[in-house]
Image: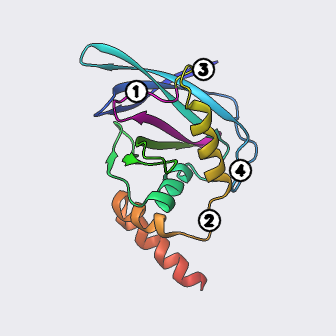
Amino acid sequence: MKIYIFLFSICLLGCSSQKVKKEEQCPKIYKNKFTKILNEKYKTIYKNETISYNEVRFECVYSALYTHKVMFDRYGKWDKPIYPSNKNHPILVWKNVDLFNNGKEYTIMTNGLESWKHIYASIMVFDNNEVDLLSENSPEKEKLTNLFAELLKNQDLENEDFYEVYWKMVDPKRWETIKEHNKNQN
């Protein structure tokens, strides 16, 4: 049985919904690993027009923030956060990113979901003409998916710079709590 929930309404893409399976998806979570890669299709209504886009999800990661973190670690701070309706955590957007050092630039959107039964970190990738590069027929889909899979597997878990920048933006009080906790651990 699937439950349809309203996930987010974003400036660039409008409103969308996401499927979440009721049964437990992640009996175990992994640092620097994931159990599987899912390709999800979304339909978005924007200015009375239906737009479809694709999201690649890395299932059962240790943190739903992992795709945010690997992008930050490699390309620096995001260009803008987009806050979906009724959500505390933003989708982070990087624009004009040369992922493969070949001069071609991409727009990367990172997202994730953490619940007691399910956790994933995800990406959406577009070219400069806003073409969805994770579509089924995209010649770049596999290359992009493989790049992010490798980035997740090889991320530096010791580098925590991302978390300070992220939490100061999203929830400064939580950052103070984290900082205090870390100080007490030392």
Q: Is residue 138 visible?
A: yes
- Please name whichever residue, 99 or 174, is drawn nearer the observer in this view of the structure: 99
Residue type (three-letter) at the residue carrying disc 1: Val
Q: Earlier in the sequence, mark 1 or mark 3?
A: 3
Residue 121: image x %, image y %? 56, 44
Q: Disc 2 and disc 3: Cα gap in Å?
A: 35 Å
Q: Is residue 116 visible?
A: no
Which element is circle 2 on? loop
Mark 2 touching mark 3, by CB under 8 A?
no
Q: Earlier in the sequence, mark 3 or mark 4?
A: 3
Residue type (three-letter) at the residue carrying disc 2: Asp
Residue 57: image x %, image y %? 59, 36
Crowd tier of the residue under label 3, counting other residues whose Cα lies within 10 Å: few below 14, some 14–19, many 20 or above? few
Q: Disc 3 and disc 4: Cα gap in Å?
A: 26 Å
Q: Is residue 103 magenta?
A: no
Mark 2 touching mark 4, by CB under 8 A?
no
Which element is circle 3 on? strand
Which element is circle 4 on? loop
Which element is circle 1 on? loop
Residue for badge 4:
33
Residue for badge 2:
156
Against 149, is 124 above or below?
above
